[in-house]
Amino acid sequence: MIAIRSGSPQPGTVSRSAAQPVTIVAVLGLLIGVFFGWALVLAMKDQGIAVFSIPVVSLIVVVVLAALAGLLAAIPPSRRAAKLNILKAIVSE
């Protein structure tokens, strides 16, 4: 994560720091979903489902779309945070 100084941060700094968790969550969700899909195929082997395949292109598209959606959702809060004077916010609380 990018540390935010005690003054007002630059808008790009806040946006970059918001983008990192979005990307990490998208990749973790992908990995968890692939694991549970694999476990489900193993559990249903007796019922005739024996092939486990990973649609790589589809997964990449989903991860990219999820990351873009997360980034778009993070823009308004990050812009508000960039405009906020942190020292005044600390004093008011």
Image: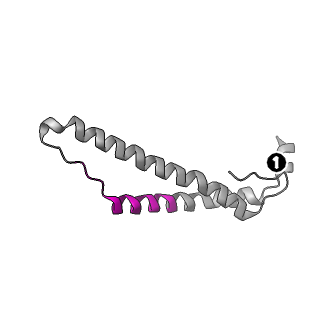
Residue 87 appears at what percent x and percent y?
Answer: 86, 49
Question: Image quarter for residue 45?
Answer: top left
Question: Image quarter for residue 60?
Answer: bottom left
Binning the other alpha carbons within 10 Å of mark 1 as few (below 14), some (14 to 19) or many (20 upward) gives few
> Which residue is depicted at the point 40% across and 43% down?
32
In the drawing, does residue 77 fall left or right of residue 65?
right
SS for tag 1? helix
> Which residue is depicted at the point 83% across and 44% down?
90
Judge whether residue 39 is colored magenta: no
In the drawing, does residue 26 fall left or right of residue 35?
right
Q: Nearer the viewer, residue 61 or 93?
A: 61
**Over which residues does the magenta segment extend?**
52-68
Above or below residue 25? Residue 93 is: above
Residue kind at label 1, given as amino acid type: Ala
Above or below residue 62? Residue 31 is: above
Above or below residue 56? Residue 88 is: above
> Which residue is depicted at the point 66% across and 55% down?
17
Residue 93 appears at what percent x and percent y?
Answer: 82, 40
Residue 21 appears at what percent x and percent y?
Answer: 58, 51
Overall secondary structure of the magenta section: helix
Query: In this figure, which residue is indicated by the disc labeled 1?
Result: 89
